[in-house]
Image (cartoon, rainbow, N blue to C red):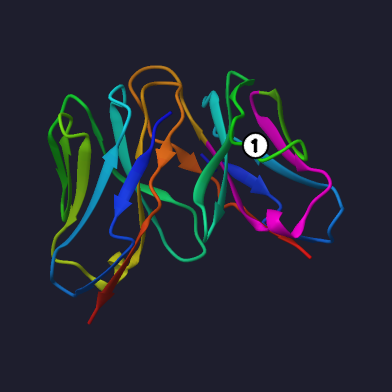
Amino acid sequence: GENVEQHPSTLSVQEGDSAVIKCTYSDSASNYFPWYKQELGKRPQLIIDIRSNVGEKKDQRIAVTLNKTAKHFSLHITETQPEDSAVYFCAASPGTASKLTFGTGTRLQVTL
Amino acid sequence: DAGVIQSPRHEVTEMGQEVTLRCKPISGHNSLFWYRQTMMRGLELLIYFNNNVPIDDSGMPEDRFSAKMPNASFSTLKIQPSEPRDSAVYFCASRPTQGLNSPLHFGNGTRLTVT
């Protein structure tokens, strides 16, 4: 089955700096890669996703890149703000009606 | 849309008791997933259903865990008998199965504490 690895497990940046979280996956059939943000005590919520026919996607301060050859994808957050502090999960899925396998999460701390 | 609805939000029970967690997926979503989240193991998929049929239950820890989806708008996850190591947050999530890959929508979770 699919195996998703995520790094780093914790990340501390100063407000205004950029943050990068990286994930690798094992199943070459995976074609859907969402990112979720989970604030303390709350449910994971989708922040951005990318499909395998696209190499990069951007939404305001967040962007995701995908390298299918190397089987890795990354989340980039620019101009970080304190409200970006949360746990971020990457995930991969091999297709419609299939399960989503999550990475182990990255705890991002944005300091003033 | 009210989103994925889970109940109860919190459950505290004694070891050996039966626990039933409930989930109502978003209307029109015909895939339903049960995840368990702990600090040590992260988000683990326990089981998922497509069109009310269990597709993959390889994540169910052991025979003490069972899940059902009697209709498109309701699912239960049961633990009998419960043990302290079952303490975790249990999330239910749903998504449509048709068309391109679509996002998973999570409920607010049930925080289970087994003493």
Q: Is residue B53 above or below residue B114?
A: above
Image location of residue A58, percent across then percent down? 15, 44
Q: Is residue B4 left or right of residue A27?
A: right
Q: Secondary structure at mark 1?
A: loop
The spot of residue B101 in percent (x, y) is: 35, 25
For disc 1, the chain is B
Q: Quadrant of residue B104?
A: top left
Q: Which residues are magenta?
A: B72-93
Left or right of A7? Residue B99 is right
Q: Is residue B106 one of those drawn in magenta?
A: no
Say whether residue B56 is visible.
yes
The image quadrant of residue B45 is top right
Residue B80 lies in magenta, yes or no? Answer: yes
- The residue at which mark 1 appears reads as B60
At x 76% / y 40%, what residue is drawn?
B78
Give x and y (percent) for residue A29: 31, 21
Label 1 is placed on what type of residue?
Met
**Left or right side of B113 for A76:** left
Q: Quadrant of the C terminus of chain B?
A: bottom right
How many circles with numbers are drawn on the protein?
1
Res. B27 visible in picture: no
